[in-house]
Image (cartoon, rainbow, N blue to C red):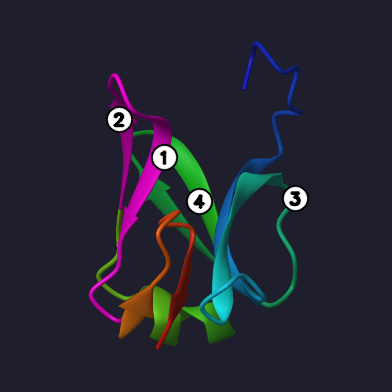
Amino acid sequence: MEEQKVPENYGLRVGVKGGGCSGFSYILGFDERKDADQEFEVDGMTIFMEKAHGIYLLGMEIDWVEGLNNRGFTFSNPNATDTCGCGTSFSA
C-alpha cells in the first residue's frame, strides 16, 4: 500500500463480478469502504467485502505464489463448481 501510495482509509477489496469464461471473476484491489460492505481485519490489514458476495466467497483462501510457471495471487474456492484454466474465474 505504501509503495502504491494508497490512501490510509482504503482497504483490500475482495469480491466477485459477473464475467470471465466460467461465469464469475474475482475482484481484488484497494478501495474505500462502501455502505454495503462488511469489514474484516486480517493480520493487521483491513478487508472489505460486499455482503452479497459472501455466499460465493465463504471459505475461500487467497494466496501468493512465485514459481517458474506463474507468479501472482491464487484463489482456492470451495464454492466453485467449475473453474477456468486461468484460475481467476469460476461458476457456483
Q: Type of residue at label 3?
A: Glu
Residue at the spot 67% in from the left edge and 75% down from the top edge: 19
Labels 4 and 3: the sequence-earlier one = 3
Task: Where is residue 70? Give x, y as percent.
Answer: 37, 30
Q: Nearer the viewer, mark 1 or mark 4?
A: 1
Residue corresponding to mark 2: 65
Task: Where is residue 23? Give x, y as percent.
Answer: 56, 82
CB under 8 Å between discs 1 and 2: yes
Q: CA distance from mark 3 to mark 2?
A: 26 Å
Report the span colored magenta.
62-79
Element at label 3:
loop
Residue at the spot 42% in from the left edge and 67% down from the top edge: 84
Q: How many marks?
A: 4
Q: CA distance from mark 1 to mark 3?
A: 21 Å
Q: CA distance from mark 1 to mark 4?
A: 16 Å
**Quadrant location of residue 87?**
bottom left
Labels 1 and 3: the sequence-earlier one = 3
Q: What's the magenta bit mostly, secondary-structure-wise?
A: strand
Q: Nearer the viewer, mark 3 or mark 2?
A: 2
Element at label 1:
strand
Magenta region includes residue 39: no
Q: Is residue 89 left or right of residue 92?
A: right
Q: Looking at the picture, tell me which residue is in the foreground, 1 or 33.
A: 1
**Image disc number at residue 32:** 3
Residue corresponding to mark 1: 73
Say if 15 sits above or below 43 in the image: below
Labels 1 and 4: the sequence-earlier one = 4
Q: Type of residue at label 2?
A: Val
Residue corresponding to mark 4: 47
